[in-house]
Image: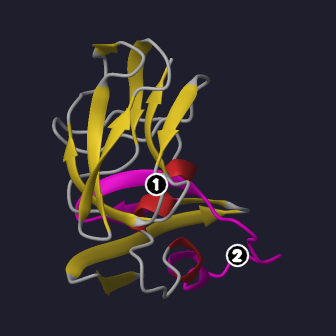
Amino acid sequence: MERTYIINGKEYKVTINSVSGNNANVTVNGTSYDVQIKDAPAAPVQPAAPVKAAPAAPVAPAPVARPVQAAQPAPAAAPVSVPAAGKTATAPLPGVILAIKVNVGDAVKAGQEIAILEAMKMENSIEAPISGTVVAINAAKGDSVLEGAPIITIQ
């Protein structure tokens, strides 16, 4: 089943490739993802997956959906979400990501600026909570995020 969703003015073409229990394989704008469906129905119903993954909220749910992706390689310059042990830098308040200043694999020091979040018409510096290596980038430039949303994971 293929559907097109518009979230905060961005168009996402979503195809549900397969559903097994609470796991699904979907393709979003040409990129394949293995995702877990929160509160999956007893009998898998394909149209339910996009509704659960993208609730109709005024703030873009795309960043919220990314953390449930299974680990997999991503194309260069694309946001990567890999559940990993470590410390995650989160959004201190709802806003829009203006910049991601690091890449997966980069070494960072505690307190180093790793992203910029615009909230209430002010730029907020997101700093590395610990020294280590960036293992996941859970948001992309232009994404709207909620307070507490994971932005970057450092291990």
52, above or below 148, in the image: below
Give the numbered dot on residue 44.
Answer: 2
- Residue 142: x and y in percent read 21, 62
Which span of residues is magenta-colored?
25-50
Q: Nearer the viewer, residue 110 or 72?
A: 110
Q: Nearer the viewer, residue 65 or 127?
A: 127
Quadrant of the rendered structure where residue 44 is? Answer: bottom right
- Residue 118: x and y in percent read 27, 60
Residue type indicated by callout 2? Pro
- The Cα atoms of the two marked residues, 1 and 2, are separated by 21 Å
Name the residue rendered at 56%, 35% in the picture: 83
Q: Is 36 contained in the magenta span? A: yes
Q: Is residue 22 left or right of residue 95?
A: right
Q: Is residue 129 left or right of residue 133?
A: right
Residue type indicated by callout 1? Arg
Name the residue rendered at 36%, 12% in the picture: 109
Q: Secondary structure at mark 1?
A: helix
* Front: mark 1 or 2: 1
Q: Is residue 45 left or right of residue 136?
A: right
- Residue 30: x and y in percent read 23, 60
Q: Secondary structure at mark 2?
A: loop
Quadrant of the rendered structure where residue 148 is? Answer: bottom right
Name the residue rendered at 42%, 24% in the picture: 135
Name the residue rendered at 35%, 50% in the picture: 139
| Residue identified by numbered label 1 | 66
- Mark 2 Cα within 10 Å, few/some/many (few <14, many 20+)? some
- Mark 1 Cα within 10 Å, few/some/many (few <14, many 20+)? many
122, above or below 10, in the image: above
